[in-house]
Amino acid sequence: MTDHELPRSQLPAGSDPNARRYGVSPARLSALMMRERAAFAARRPRSAELASQAAAHWHDGVPLHWMSDWGLPFPMFLERAKGSILTDADGHEHVDFCLGDTGSMFGHAPEPIVRAVAEQAALGITGMLPSVHVPEVGRLLAARFGLPWWQITMTASDANRAVIRWARAVTGRRDILVFDGCYHGAVDDTHVRLRDGRPILRPGLMGQVWSLPEHTRVVPFNDLATLEAELTDGDVALVLTEPVMTNIGMVLPEPGFHEAVRDLTHRAGTLLAIDETHTISSGPGGYTRAHGLDPDFFVLGKPIAGGVPAAVYGFTDAVAAGMKRARAATPGYSGMGTTLTANALAVAAMRACLREVMTAGAYDHMIALADLLAGELERTITRHRLPWVVTRVGARVEFMLSPTRPRDGGEAGRIGDVEIEGALRLYLIERGVIITPFHNMMLIAPTTTRGDVERLVVAFDAAMAELTG
């Protein structure tokens, strides 16, 4: 999780400040925000003190800058997290629908993961050798996700970097292609956006000194004609895509989109990578198995080891053969992998997660409750006459400040209002509910209960009543 796309206000310059924004009264919004910020600060003296101490040595007061992106008066410090309950440093319990933005989507500290980590830690954490669990984990990955060959990395960002390098090495081509508004972690090659139909560096990108659009092409999601045009010259090594766009707000693929992408890439001799890191909410085999996708590469990070840093990428027999040829032709350091990659602790956690946590039964529970949550949110939005829409992908639910679902990342990037979404997020926190700060996303875990969903819906309804009158 790094630099997420933040929603922007669409209130045009010179507009009447008293006019409703997305169905919300600006006066009510301002009053609610002032009250909730004061309440947050008053109830969290311990977090305030920790924030003051952290500011002495941590840049922006936090170990990673996005931890300050919640829009709170000061960071809320974590004391403990178990199941679907997150407890802050002042002892307040919150039902957690953020779940580490997918990293803990199977609940915080699942018992099989805790047990596996404790047992492996006593036996050794890392040693630059494959652990005894490696063969079984390989079999589990192949059986679950349908690809025969696998490698481990520390993060999905690392996995995507490796996939891009391998694709270029295997095909002998330099260019890759991504979709406008995509999110593939902290991978330089993917930080390109469209502006007026032209590729540019992603706004806000720090310290980038070479031109990424020189070798990264970017097209709108769901735009098959433009995709085909970009692939016709035969210079694109890889199309890297999420099956559903998730980090700029959820953008669903139109019917037949993925089948057409696979056909176009096959015809162009271009490899196809599916990044499932967020859409693993779709089912035990991710969106790829649930919808019968046929990628050359498959990437999964965050939740694969129950929150322990680890990620994997899988690939086909044909890609594996190409990788062997590329290595034989250019022996030496590949530029991929780090010393702690595939450490024994991560492999043990991954084994426990695949065997005991990411079960079909867990997904049945998660998806059923997500369906309930999506329906309740839709009814609440309709009752308050808000021009908002709800989207669900498996156990992942999101509302967007738009009357219709966006078709591509460009549309999604123009949706949102920092003040409205920040006020709602703060209102929910003060009523013991946490949703994701970077976009209005909610995840259901195996440990989430119907009562937890009802608590979120009641708080959401109360907030809408205050904001709309």
Image (spheres, grey):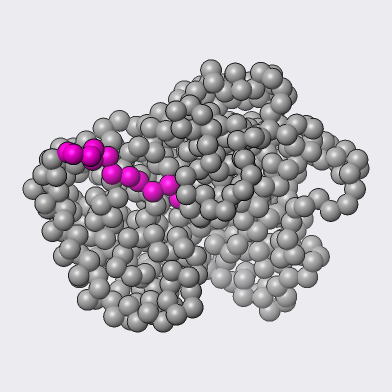
**Residue at 59 percent of width and 19 percent of height:** 228
Corner quadrant of residue 122: bottom right
Q: Residue 72: give x, y in percent of width and height.
A: 31, 64
Tell whether position 11 is magenta.
yes
Q: Residue 388: give x, y in percent of width and height.
A: 25, 38
Corner quadrant of residue 165: top right
**Residue at 46 percent of width and 63 percent of height:** 65
- Magenta stretch secondary structure, dominant: loop
Question: Is residue 452 left or right of 20 when viewed as pictured?
Answer: right
On the question of residue 150 being in view, the answer is yes
Question: Is residue 12 left or right of 52 when viewed as pictured?
Answer: left
On the question of residue 374 being in view, the answer is no
Furthest-left residue in this view: 469
Q: Is residue 404 above or below residue 122?
A: above
Q: Residue 438: give x, y in percent of width and height.
A: 39, 52
Q: Nearer the viewer, residue 378 or 340?
A: 340
**Residue at 64 percent of width and 35 percent of height:** 214
Residue range highlighted in magenta: 4-15
Corner quadrant of residue 412: top left
Q: Nearer the viewer, residue 274 or 373?
A: 274
**Residue at 36 percent of width and 73 percent of height:** 88
Q: Residue 448: give x, y in percent of width and height.
A: 37, 58
Q: Nearer the viewer, residue 434 or 216?
A: 216
Question: Is residue 34 left or right of 399 when viewed as pictured?
Answer: left
Tell whether position 297 is magenta.
no
Q: How many marks?
A: 0
